[in-house]
């Protein structure tokens, strides 16, 4: 039901006019198998009105009379996935003689060109992202353009530029708190802190933001109704981020068991982004990384993954985050295979990109599941990702977001 139709009906009801819903035609999406975020339903029928799911059933008898039927019984249905760590404005035009990093253009041009990153993200079945660090608030601009329908892409929870330690200045919790207030005034959804070094081919995890500064940021953000993600490649920064009350911790290697236990106790979500370093190894020629950089990246992957394996045993809440940049868009869900290697079942791994991710974002009343009242974000996958998660990497054939089909490769 369109907003215009809703408004018209509301006016008619106020005038005491009887309204028939015969013209508000429902749609019924049929799947051979459906994982709704908690369980599998065979021969499933998802009934949609406008942008919302109104009913879940099974068998032809669950199709409402007069509904438009979308027959996807060849496929497995899933909720739209959530990527908790992207950099959607990092765009490379692949021009000869250029590298992904270092291109200079007007922010508005970058926002326009980054539509390609947004499209590739949708094609992986990801309908929501949390974007953590974009210059000039470009991710906020993309968030608004997508929300208004002017641009196709996943809905965005944006942080704008991440907060960093002030170069050459002593630690100053008060100054960091002021930065939070400025970010919130700018309209961000999340606060991100770069708590350590590390990124691209640099896996140096040296902590750069003190515990007191982290705590000041977290307290200020929470007081203003915002959550905090803290980047740390190294174990000390992860430990302090957890102690400071971060809502999520990004990256991390060599995390000690005591910190993992504290994460589990607090419910901190860890977004380890194991796969992004695999991507940097595969794409090292594109970036022009120095010879031998893959050795340090492989070593970091091993340490990062070993911590994830222990985190699974410790009951830490993990979140799927790709850390996608430049040519990594389109590979957003490959992190899930690392989680399964670490000891999760496919359903548990998918939960890191649905129910857990939605809860972290504070939208678990409308995203992360296929249920009545939830937004109609649906994905059709050829194959069965609950048996082989790799079906997610090549098998996404159809995606719906907010009740609108945004990918159709049937």
Image (cartoon, rainbow, N blue to C red):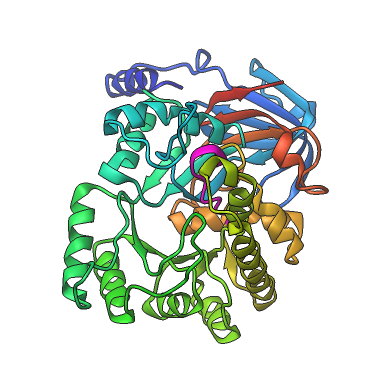
Of the pair 115 and 165, the residue shown nearer to us: 165
- Residue drawn at the location 41% of the way across and 79% of the way down: 240
Tell whether 143 sits left or right of 329.
left
Q: How far across and down, in percent of the image, does residue 151 sit?
A: 40, 25
Q: Quadrant of residue 313?
A: bottom right
Which residues, given as a range, are shown in magenta?
320-328
From the image, which quarter does the C terminus lie in?
Answer: top right
Magenta span: predominant SS is loop
Q: Nearer the viewer, residue 304 or 20?
A: 304
Residue 225: percent from left, percent from top: 29, 61
For the point 19% across and 73% down, which residue is it?
169
Task: Give the farthest residue toward the bottom.
Answer: 258
Q: Is residue 204 magenta?
A: no
Q: Position of residue 330 (x, y in %)?
A: 59, 36
Question: x%, y% of residue 401?
Answer: 53, 31
Q: Is residue 187 visible?
A: yes
Please indicate whether residue 4 sits to the left or right of residue 249 in the image: left
Instruction: Tell me if residue 321 is in the magenta stretch.
Output: yes
Question: Measured along the vertical axis of the image, is residue 187 above or below residue 236?
Answer: above
Viewer can see residue 372: no
Q: Does residue 234 sit above or below 347 in this rendering? A: below
Residue at 64% across / 69% down in the picture? 308
Residue at the far front: name it.
291
Q: Residue at x 23, y 67 (%)?
A: 167
Q: How many marks?
A: 0
């Amino acid at each position: 039901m369109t907003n215009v139709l809703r408004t018209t009906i509301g006016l008619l009801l106020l005038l005491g006019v009887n309204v028939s819903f015969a013209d508000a035609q429902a749609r019924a999406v049929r799947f051979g198998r459906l994982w709704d975020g908690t369980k599998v339903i065979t021969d499933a029928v998802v009934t949609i009105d406008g942008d919302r799911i109104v009913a879940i059933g099974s068998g032809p008898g669950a199709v409402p009379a007069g509904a438009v039927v979308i027959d996807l019984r060849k496929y497995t249905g899933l909720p739209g996935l959530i990527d908790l760590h992207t950099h959607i404005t990092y765009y490379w035009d692949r021009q000869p003689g250029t590298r992904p990093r270092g291109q200079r253009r007007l922010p508005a041009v970058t926002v326009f060109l980054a539509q390609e990153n947004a499209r590739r993200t949708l094609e992986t079945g990801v309908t929501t992202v949390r974007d953590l660090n974009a210059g000039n608030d470009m991710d906020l601009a993309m968030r608004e353009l997508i929300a208004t329908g002017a641009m196709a892409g996943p809905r965005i929870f944006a942080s704008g530029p991440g907060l960093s330690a002030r170069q050459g200045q002593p630690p100053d919790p008060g100054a960091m708190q002021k930065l939070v207030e400025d970010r919130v005034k700018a309209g961000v959804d999340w606060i991100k802190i770069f708590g350590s070094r590390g990124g691209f081919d640099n896996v140096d995890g040296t902590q750069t933001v003190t515990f007191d500064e982290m705590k000041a940021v977290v307290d200020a953000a929470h007081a203003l109704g915002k959550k905090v993600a803290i980047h740390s490649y190294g174990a000390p920064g992860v430990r302090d981020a957890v102690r400071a009350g971060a809502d999520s911790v990004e990256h991390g290697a060599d995390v000690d068991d005591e910190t993992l236990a504290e994460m589990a106790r607090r419910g901190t979500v860890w977004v380890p982004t194991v796969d992004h370093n695999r991507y940097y190894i595969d794409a090292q020629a594109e970036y022009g990384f120095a010879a031998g950089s893959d050795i340090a990246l492989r070593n970091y992957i091993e340490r990062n993954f070993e911590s994830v394996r222990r985190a699974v045993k410790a009951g830490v809440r993990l979140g799927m985050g790709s850390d996608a940049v430049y040519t990594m868009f389109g590979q957003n869900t490959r992190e899930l295979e690392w989680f399964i290697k670490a000891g999760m079942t496919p359903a548990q791994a998918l939960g890191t990109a649905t129910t857990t991710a939605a809860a972290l974002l504070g939208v678990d009343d409308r995203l992360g599941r296929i249920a009545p009242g939830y937004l109609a974000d649906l994905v059709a996958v050829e194959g069965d990702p609950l048996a082989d998660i790799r079906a997610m990497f090549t098998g996404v054939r159809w995606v719906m977001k907010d009740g609108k089909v945004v990918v159709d490769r049937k």
